Image: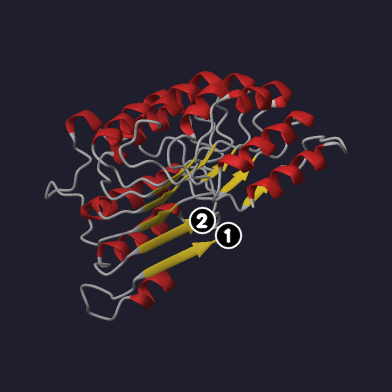
Amino acid sequence: MDTICGSLCSSGAETHQIHHFSISSSSFHEIDPVSLAHSLASFLSSGRSLRSLKLCDNNLDRNFAKSVFSTLLDSSCSLTSFDLSENNISGWLSIFNWKSNTFLSSSGVTKSLQSLRILKLGGNNLQKDDAGNLRYVLVQMPSLEILDLSDNPIEDDGIRSLIPYFAEASKSCSPLTDLNLGSCELSSDGVILLLDVLSTLARPLNSLSLADNGLGSQVAEALGKFWGTSIQVLNLEGIGLGPSGFRKLRDIRMENLKLVKLNISKNRGGIETAKFLSKLILHAPKLVAVNAAYNLMPAESLPLICSALKTAK
């Protein structure tokens, strides 16, 4: 890392002209973490032209993440994409005093956060307290469009901590378009609260993933209300809908839905999956892709779906 970061900075120059920096699937276990963080911090501090930073699947810990984040807060770059996914950084935001705003840069302006459009933190073992701290970071990102928190056990308490951020976004025409909350150990209680807020966004989401959370059929009514927005891509893989969930979804009013892609795989819905799809196809004219694998649909499902496809033409 010392060699890489040093070579990217011209000798004697205060800044470098690198726009995109990425290190993925590498291990820094045998390197002094203090030296490693210092090398990268020096590189980031001189990166006024830096636009994207990706440090994915590098076995980085929370202390390293804290150092990188602190440096970014004080940097003058206009970062648009920050990817720290697939590390182990739980607790990385705990040192900052959010209520006093001491996390702001010395100039009081977090330029690198204000310009950020993509934030990926998936697979980092983030807990509910991390979600609570992240809420204060997100409000400093008025340009954020894509947020990936997948594969983090933040649970319902974590979602409740983030809901005030989404509620504020619903009033301010937030540019947020893509939200990934797959495999976050959520239940129907937390997701129903979330969907109620997301349904009120002045600028609706384009894409939402709730995959691999044990939500059950109880979430069906809230989902039905939510997809009445302009949602285009919806991932409901493995959320435990079952036959009763698909039956409830089918009974909900559908009218000119904006859905383009839908994943309802691994929900074990049986014939009710086909009945739901046969109705959905008629009311989602822009729908081009559906993944309904592993739903245990019997042979009589095919005529139902084919009939709906012919009618939709």
Are dots 2 and 1 in contact, CB under 8 Å?
yes
Give the residue type at disc 2: Cys
Q: How many marks?
A: 2
Query: Which residue is disc 2 drawn over?
Result: 56
* Rendered position, 19 above or below 259: below
Residue at the spot x=50%, y=49% of the render? Answer: 85
Picture coordinates of residue 68, whole percent (x, y): 35, 52
Q: Secondary structure at mark 2?
A: strand
* Rendered position, 151 above or below 243: below
Picture coordinates of residue 296, whole percent (x, y): 82, 34
Residue at the spot x=41%, y=32% of the render? Answer: 130
Image side of residue 287 versus residue 112, left or right: right
Where, by quadrant of the figure, is residue 18 drawn? bottom left
Query: Which residue is disc 1 drawn over?
Result: 25
Q: Nearer the viewer, residue 147 or 255?
A: 255
Q: Earlier in the sequence, mark 2 or mark 1?
A: 1
Residue at the spot x=30%, y=59% of the render? Answer: 79
Colour convention: secondary structure
Image side of residue 37 versus residue 101, left or right: right
